[in-house]
Every structure is written in C-alpha cells, then in structure tokens.
Image (cartoon, helix red, strand yellow):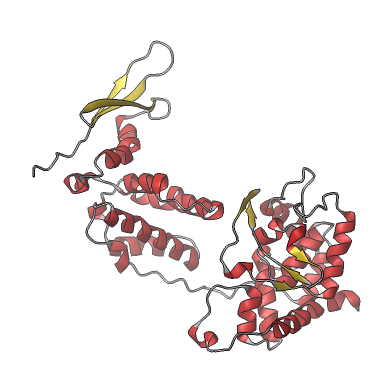
Amino acid sequence: MKTRRYQYGDLRLRKRKNGPDVWQFRYFENGRRKSVLIGTVTKLPTKADAIKSIEHRRMEINSDNPQQGFHVVTVQGLAERYKGEELPSRYSTRVSYLSFLNGYIIPRWGAVRLEAVRPLEVEAWLRQLSLANKTKSHIRGLMHVLFQCARRWGYVQENPIELVRQSARRSAAPRVITAAQFCALLSHLKEPYRTMVLLAGCLGLRASEVTGLQWRDVDWDELSIFIRRSVVHGREGEAKTEASEKPIPLDPDLATEILKHRERSVYIQPTDFIFAGDSGKPRWQESILADHIKPAAEAAKIQGKVGWHTFRHTYSSLLRDLGTDVKVQQELLRHADISTTMNIYTQAVSEKKRKAARKAVKALLKPIRN
C-alpha cells in the first residue's frame, strides 16, 4: 500500500486593499483544496511567525501519517495541538498548564524539533530556573505529558522526559504561624474576610474551597461542612479531588461564627455563596489576599510571607503538635494520598475526627477568649 506523502501545505501572503495584508494557508483535504486565513501581518509580522502558527494545523492534516514529517515537528507545534485537544477541562488546572506552557516551555523549547530535545539539556534548564522545586517538578511533569501525547500521535517513539530528573522536595519548610499570630491577624481583618480566614485556619480549607462554599453545604443538624465545588477567578468548578469532598466536622464555636456572618449577609438562600460579593458572585481570592490579608499581616507585625495556603499549613502543623492520629490528619486535610507509613493506620472514626478538629479550633480561638 502506497504511503501518502507528508503534506506541508502552501503558505503565502495575501494582499488586501483595505486593512493589513493577511497570511493564507492552503492544503488538500479529501482531494479538495482548502484555504484558511491565519492572521494579519500585524499579528504575525514575519513568515517565520506565520509558520509557527500553522504548525499544529499541519500536524492535524497529517494525523494519519505523522512519521513522514516527524523531523519538522517542534515543541511549539506539539504544545499547540495539546492545547486544542488535550488540555484539562478543570479551570484552575487549565490556567496553571497554560501558564507553564506560555511562560516557560514554549519560550525555551518552542522552536526545538521533538527529536532534538535531550534529557540532560532539559535537566540543566530546570536547574537554572529561579523557581521552587515543586514548580519545576510540575513543569517537568507537563513536558512529560506533552511527549506522551507525541508518542500517542506517532511523532516520536520514546519520551525523553522520562530520563529527566527533578526533585519536588521543598527547599524550606512550609510557612506556618502561631495561634497568637493567627488571632492577631484576625483582629486586623474586617468582615467577611475575618470569617473567611477563620474557616481557612480552623478547617484547613483551600482558598478556592472557601470562596466556593454555599449555604446548602452546611449541615447544621450534624454540624458538618461539605466541599462540593471550588471557585477560581470567579469560575465554579469541581472539588480538587474526590477526597476533598468528604464531610468536615464543624465545631460548635465555629458554627456560631458562621451564623453571625449569616445574620450580616444579604445572600442567604441555599444556593447562594456564603462569602458572596456585592453582586452575589464569588469573591476573587487573589484580591482578598492582596487587599486584606497581606495588609492585616503587616499590621499584626507578622514577619515573612503570609498567603492562603499558610492557614492550611498552620492547621496541618497544629494537628501534628496536638498529637493527632496521622490517619485522622489525612482525613481532616482531605488528602487523596498519604505515605505508605501513614496508610498502615486504620480508618479514623468520625468521633476521632471531631475531637481532633475541636482541639484545633480551641487552640486557635484561645487567645481571643483570654
């Protein structure tokens, strides 16, 4: 059977009387000539720019015969096809992946052919990036995913990133604050930001989980909170993991604080967000951090960086300091995985989780009540 020749298509500049000239890409599909306008010279000033922008189209029209043109496929072409076909649907993940692709991977590797990517060069590049090891590990992981797609699409036989070593180990311990510092921070926060931080600290919630809470997520009879969604940049999405959706015991004192907030709120229907903005929509966690939490931390004279995840780390550290069973820690923090050593513990019963959560709340609220 005769192998169909790899189709490069025809790229040319099309003159226009009105407006800037435009790049036109022509190719054959099912025996018929197709024509697509790629972009103007304002957007793509050089032919090299235009070629880069059509590479993923070339990959698509040659999808049934990728090996004939594998030697011209670049990382940018692969990345653009990945964006169009494989990018995860979860909003926060998409934002993170696009940031890694457009901010790091494409600027450094975009023009490099797939066959020319070498493990040691990738390792050296990751080493010189001024980023945390965990972030570098995420970038390495995404490059691995890209080349797995390249294997599946037939552009490469092996994944060079499999040989790239990059530790995800933290270079420093996670930032935590003391109970006294936590209470000092609360004293410099106005509502509803005080109650938001209170929940983040006393329940170990992620920022996206705090902003995603709705009134129907609180079971007042059983004193439990359910994490059923996350909100990032005002966009509602699923909880981070299945483990994240497990019920969280709600301490009576903390329940009282939430009820006080409800009395002040305008939006109190079951499907309303607990911390809705003036329009009824979720607040942006980045704005809260920049405009309220950081200034409050500075006013409370707390040294070092304070972010949303500081409260989750503080909660985790507090649970350990209180001698909480490691399996209970895992379930209260709603981690999907735990180390093999921790997994040998038996499943924690609800009463143990409630007791541990009660201790954490009392420890964090004690300075306020004294």
Depth check: give the residue in front, 227 or 156. 227
Q: Is residue 344 left or right of residue 304?
A: left
Residue furthest top as drawn: 17
For image coordinates 33% across by 55% down, the residue present is 149
Which quadrant of the figure has residue 367? bottom right
Residue furthest front as drawn: 221
Depth check: give the residue in front, 315 or 7. 7
| Residue 196 place in picture, x, y as percent | 76, 61
For image coordinates 32% across by 41% down, the residue present is 56
Q: Is residue 274 left or right of residue 235?
A: right
Q: State whether residue 307 appears in this view.
A: no
For image coordinates 53% across by 79% down, the residue present is 338
| Residue 265 place in picture, x, y as percent | 86, 53
Depth check: give the residue in front, 2 or 279. 2
Which quadrant of the figure has residue 256? bottom right
Q: Is residue 5 left or right of residue 177?
A: left
Placement of the N terminus among the 4 image quadrants? top left
Depth check: give the residue in front, 24 or 109. 24
| Residue 187 place in picture, x, y as percent | 85, 65
| Residue 365 place in picture, x, y as percent | 83, 75
The vertical placement of 91 against 8, above or below, is: below
